[in-house]
Image (spheres, coloured by chain):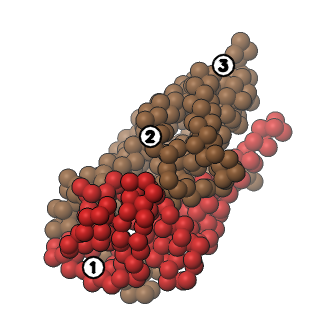
Amino acid sequence: VTAGVFLKKMTQGRFRFHEPRPFHRQAQAFCSAETLVRAFYACLLFFAANGMGSWEGIANRGAFDLLWPVAWLGWTNPQMGASLIFAFYLVSMLAAAFAPRLRWARFAAFFGLFQYQALHYSNGKIGHSMHAWLLISFLLIFLPNAWGGSQPLNRRERQSFLQVFWTCQAFFLLTYSMAGLGKVAGAIYQASIGEITCFHPQAFALHAAERLLETHSSSAFGGWFIEHPLAGWPLMIGGVYLQFFSLLALFRPPLLRLWALGLALFHLLSFFVLTINFPSSVLLLALFLFASPFLSRNYSSREILETLPLFGPVFRRLLSRCAAS
Amino acid sequence: MRSYRKLKRFLAGFLLFVFVGGLLTLLVPRQEIYPIYSWFLFALTPNAKTRYALQILEYQNQLLDPPLFYEEAGDLVPKPRSITLVKIAQFWGRAVEQGDETAENKNRALFESNFLPGASRYALMRVHYDPIARWKTGAVHMETVRLYRAEGARP
């Protein structure tokens, strides 16, 4: 039993969303996924072109804290090595955006991004805004080689394509679930030593105050939430709930788009309160989850409510009581 | 069919690796090994506790009276709102407390080269505050951990 089947059995339980015409749907889903993969590489090219203005500053840093993938810069002239990385990064992104169907181009794009991000974050702190893009570009190497050429892919190859795409979605949602798990584990630890946890009414205000103080910045709503801590309480609890059950949403189709929307709103709110901007994650949510190729229809609000983690069974009982009466 | 099964096993293994590997990185000092990370972002709620901060006493022959925290010296320094520097200060403070000279020198070099170019005198401070109380009243308790002087090769 593979991990995927195991996860499906664990998470779907009694929720079954039957697909009446699976082979027809496979062809449709493949077309969507193929377009999304092309869009993914177009976005990576945009990121590369958009970041060119910062290259001089990166290359001319007075000191580096080289991460292991770019440790080789320590044995050469860092400015020259950095220029090599920039050149390879840009050319590889062009190649992958132009011909994403070729595996070597996808591999080059992954390697170029891997090196560039390692250099970018060789400054004492590793940022995480492009980690998901990087690891998804690694997964996409394993798409069938030369798809979209003169020979159409057969059913098995299309299924392989979709399997890789599904894993990209699963990986991306897994990162949110791990963030949720971190908050729950952190809360257990902090409760055990008598500290305020993320479930405390003041938690959101504490995060806002800490962030704004340490960067000496201001945000649109940060000050207000610090003055009115209770207003942030449901947002904090909702954020932890949303993050923790993100991966589960992938196995419950009625929830997927709604969850992605919630996560996008979570990022946007983070900017307006904490000044933390994750535009690349919002883009990835819109690209791979709002437009998920695996959703074949719209779901009713009843289906959404009944499949909510933790609260689904309550809604199911309530709704069936309403129907009976 | 065999290659499809292999692919499925590999993809499942990748997800497992991301999860388990990510959690295991919590055991290393920096809590991540690029690009594997636990994704424990904002896992701990900031309580009233001790952090480290950098306070500038003199910069490019200009004496600051009273001294300013780096993040407050917006008109003087190049990157006053950098979250990277906040992180560097925490690594630096811990290195000093643990007597780790290598890590102290590394973080000092990063700071002086990338964040405070030019001659300066500054202090690594231990600051203790409750975030909400400090936001409302400015209340903060601080003590000097170490004083530094930079000659400043690049003004």
Residue at the far top: name it: A150
Report the Cα–Cα distance between label 2 and label 1: 36 Å
Q: Same chain for marks 3 and 2?
A: yes
Residue tagged 2: A54
- The residue labelled by disc 1 is B130
Q: In front here: B19 or B110?
A: B110
Q: Tell me, yes or no, if residue A75 can be seen here.
A: yes
Image hue for chain A: brown
- Residue B78 vs residue A251, the one in the foreground: B78
Compared with A159, B23 (above or below) is: below
CB atoms of marks 2 and 1 within 8 Å:
no
Q: Which residue is mark 3?
A: A148
Query: Which amino acid is tagged 3?
Result: Gly
Q: Is residue A180 visible?
A: no
Q: Quadrant of residue B135?
A: bottom left
Q: Which chain hosts label 1?
A: B
Q: Is residue A264 above or below residue B142?
A: above
Chain on which label 2 sits: A
Packing grade of label 2 (10 A; few <14, some 14-19, many >=20) is: few
Left or right, A179 with reference to B37: left
Write the residue at 57% across / 79% down: B100
| Residue drawn at the location 45% of the way across and 76% of the way down | B93
Query: Few, some or many C-alpha atoms within 10 Å of disc 1 (few <14, some 14-19, many ≥20)?
Result: some
Q: Chain of mark 3?
A: A
Q: Which x, y percent locates residue A164? A: 65, 39
**Chain B shown in which color?**
red
In the picture as drawn, the residue positioned furthest to the right comes out as B2
Residue A192, x across and y down, in percent: 44, 86
Check disc 2 and report its element: helix, strand or loop.
helix
C-alpha distance separating marks 3 and 2: 35 Å
Q: Nearer the viewer, mark 2 or mark 1?
A: 2
